[in-house]
Amino acid sequence: MTKTNPTHTKAWEKLQAHFSEIKDFNLKEAFQKNPNRADAFTLKWEDFYVDYSKNLITEETRDLLTALAEEAGLKEAINALFEGEEINRTEGRSVLHTALRSKADASIKVEGENVIPEVFEVKENIREFSYSVITGAKKGFTGKAFTDVVNIGIGGSDLGPVMVTEALEYYKNHLKVHFVSNVDGDHVQEVIKDLNPETTLFIIVSKSFSTQETLANSTTIRKWFTKKAPADAVAKHFVAVSSNVKAVEEFGIETQNIFPMWDWVGGRFSLWSAVGLSISLSIGYDNFNALLEGARKMDEHFKETDFKENIPVQLALLTLWYNNFFKAETQAIIPYTQYLHRFPAYLQQAIMESNGKGVDRNGNEVSYQTGNIVWGEPGTNSQHAFFQLIHQGTKLIPADFIGFKKSLHNEQEHHNKLMANFFAQTEALLQGKSSDEVRKELEAKNTSEEKIEKLLPFKVFKGNNPTTTILIDKLSPESLGKLIALYEHQIFVQGIIWNIYSYDQWGVELGKQLATTILDEIEKNDVGTHDSSTGNLLKFYLQE
Ligand code: F6P
């Protein structure tokens, strides 16, 4: 991996000059001038149709951005990623979530050893375990089949599984899957209050097995469970997914009930491993494997395709264009399917925990913007919530619109309405509405001249708001796998160009350390030395 400051590259210099020329780029005019603009900026791959023509770019912008990726050594970096080089330098680890979805005959080495056989061994365990729980062959302590599964984990040990199980609800079986993540005791109590210990399986997911939230929730649940069941029933009802076998055993889970995780898979990229056990239980192993297969296909596309035709590369470059040249602070992600309602939250961890870094690969503070802020909610709900600001606010907010050609329940009338909104929004964001159009519209309604004058400025839409449309044939385990991997690879591309390390997360440590100190003070009712704000708040909290 190079350690080049991107702003010192030739490509950046050219982009800067190019940006000053086109910063007032008018999308509407661009479409008028070139009726084939959409074709020039559409990528079709498998069941994906990606139209990025509604962005503030010309073909030259694409060429220059692509040249930046090349100058940043992206090609070599992609090879390093897939070959298992220790690209997570600050933690001394490889970054191999791609190995989890590789073919069985692949050979990917970590410290000289091919990890693929072990990956497939664990996949086989996931398959067998899922089959035995789903069919009812595996039973609880009173001989009853399992009806409920509780995933206990947080961050990457929660968000991936919860997002995917929600996204693939249509494919799910009879097992009810629940998630406990927050250390807020009300969360765990709400989840367990209606559960029957005889028929509930608990999966504790924690790569480190030292995460406060997960240990607290697991301890509370085990206490609740052993009040209602004999102590030796724990072995039948609790399994764990972790790379810290010793700590899991100390917690009381038997070795044969531990699914391994590996150092070379980051938490926020781990849903493809045994961390996805709750996914496999919820939709069956074959569907889980199809999810992995989708991601594998995207991996291949990312690895093999020329940058100009490469979907993750091009979309990553667009984000960089807005982030670093237009100085856009955020990016909206709007899935037009209720099933993907947790997708933006999932991406917040994946993207912001990865690229929220202010120090470059040389250890120097960066002098340019990095990590983009992502947020969003499904359409059409979001249209009735925050779209006002995207249409008429003062901020530039590029948005990804994700939609599907087919509805899963064959509710065609609903789907046409949903998709009409999907297409209408990107068109409205592009076209806007001029004062002439507003005037004509009001005149057609016989509005008085006085009222027109008053209302006109408020009804004008400037338009020119950039969007990217990702239109996929159907929401399925495979297409979801492709979609997730598409965003994972964008994170990688951006991290490489921004010259940062995307795969550590030191920034979450300080809060954890201070919370340990403060918890001790709360428990001892003895407030230590703090700034006056924190000190006063603690005293107020402890007041009877
Ligand atoms: O938030 C920090 C973090 O380390 C995430 O990266 C991780 O996904 C999460 O905590 C949970 O960690 P663990 O799986 O070790 O409990």
Image (spheres, rainbow, N blue to C red):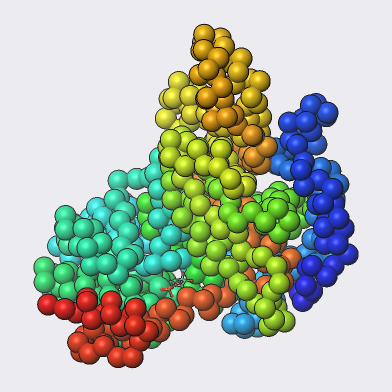
Q: Would residue 64 appear left or right of 28 to someone viewing this image?
A: right
Residue at the spot x=19%, y=79% of the render? 542
Question: 402 and 31: which one is in front?
Answer: 31
Residue at the outermost front position: 450
Query: Which quadrant of the structure image shows residue 71?
Result: bottom right
Location of the N terminus (image quadrant) = bottom right
Q: Quadrant of ligand 1?
A: bottom left
Q: Would residue 66 appear left or right of 534 to someone viewing this image?
A: right
| Residue 519 placement (x, y as % from top left) | 28, 83
Residue 247 showing in the rendered view: no
| Residue 253 placement (x, y as % from top left) | 30, 77
| Residue 482 placement (x, y as % from top left) | 60, 49
Residue at the spot x=70%, y=53% of the render? 326
Question: 186 and 173: which one is in front?
Answer: 186
Q: Would residue 378 appear left or right of 390 to someone viewing this image?
A: left
Residue at the spot x=30%, y=46% of the render? 174
